[in-house]
Amino acid sequence: MQLVVARIGRAHGIKGEVTVEVRTDEPELRLAPGAVLATDPASAGPLTIETGRVHSGRLLLRFEGVRDRNAAEALRNTLLIADVDPDETPEDPDEYYDHQLMDLDVVTKDGAEVGRITDIAHLPSQDLFVVERADGGEVLIPFVGEIVVEIDLEEQRVIVDPPPGLIDDRAEIASSRDSSAESSTESAEPSGEEA
């Protein structure tokens, strides 16, 4: 199975290094010196990583045969793709590869069907499950422990405990209740004397 593990950014310096946008939780494994990666577009590769280092919080890579800034800049926006055994799992039992989560059924704690995971959006702050509902609509569910309470790969399902309004219209009910409570508080007489 092929997985996108990084996207090449701009050239860094004059000796062929490039910045990379990492798209794997295991960069030390997937982007290590000696790794041979396929590319998209395919005409840019395959690329073999010669060196890697972190500079100012960014990963810099140099590929075999890429010796100057022009060659490095020509690789900009190229996707780096690693071959991964489909049965391989992350070392941490609470981590998952995207392909393990795709097409899992999503249900709430009380058993209500939400939909099926069709994509995973990797944002800087958190990951989101893109869930297609039975009616064809989509809902985005943050992949955080407070909401995603269980992932059962054997049963092919994800159990979620969404806050009001995330997947249904319970937010309107809650806000109506809150506004009626506020109006009854506002009508209460203040105690004490005015100064």
Image (spheres, rainbow, N blue to C red):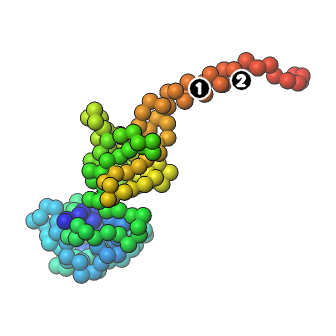
Residue at image point 31% right, 62% down: 97
Q: Is residue 80 above or below residue 190?
A: below
| Mark earlier in primary sequence (2, 1) | 1
**Can you say whether 74 is above or below 187 in the image?**
below
- Name the kind of residue labelled 1 in the image: Arg
Measured as percent of width and height from the top left, residue 112 is found at 39, 39
Quarter occupied by residue 94 = bottom left
Distance between mark 2 and mark 1 Cα atoms: 13 Å
Q: Nearer the viewer, residue 137 or 63?
A: 137
Q: Is residue 56 left or right of residue 117?
A: right
Residue positioned 27% across, 80% down in the render = 33
Q: Residue furthest left?
A: 43
Residue at the image point whose x is 32% and y is 69% from the top: 89
Specify whether residue 4 is in view.
yes
- Secondary element under disc 2, as helix, strand or loop, is helix
Q: Which residue does the numbered mark 2 point to in the structure image?
A: 185
**Closer mark to the observer between disc 2 and disc 1:** 1
Q: Position of residue 43 (x, y in %)?
A: 10, 65
Q: Position of residue 124 (x, y in %)?
A: 40, 55
Instruction: From this view, report whether residue 154 is shown above or below residue 57.
Output: above
Q: Position of residue 118 (x, y in %)?
A: 27, 47
Where is the N terminus found, in terms of image quarters? bottom left
- The residue lying at 35 percent from left, 69 percent from top is 90
**Residue, disc 1:** 177
Count the labels in the image: 2
> Is any atom of residue 73 visible in this view?
no
Among the 4 quarters of the image, the one containing residue 185:
top right
Above or below for 2 versus 14: above
Say which amino acid is labelled 2. Answer: Thr
Left or right of 56? Residue 24 is left
Q: Is residue 168 left or right of residue 38?
A: right
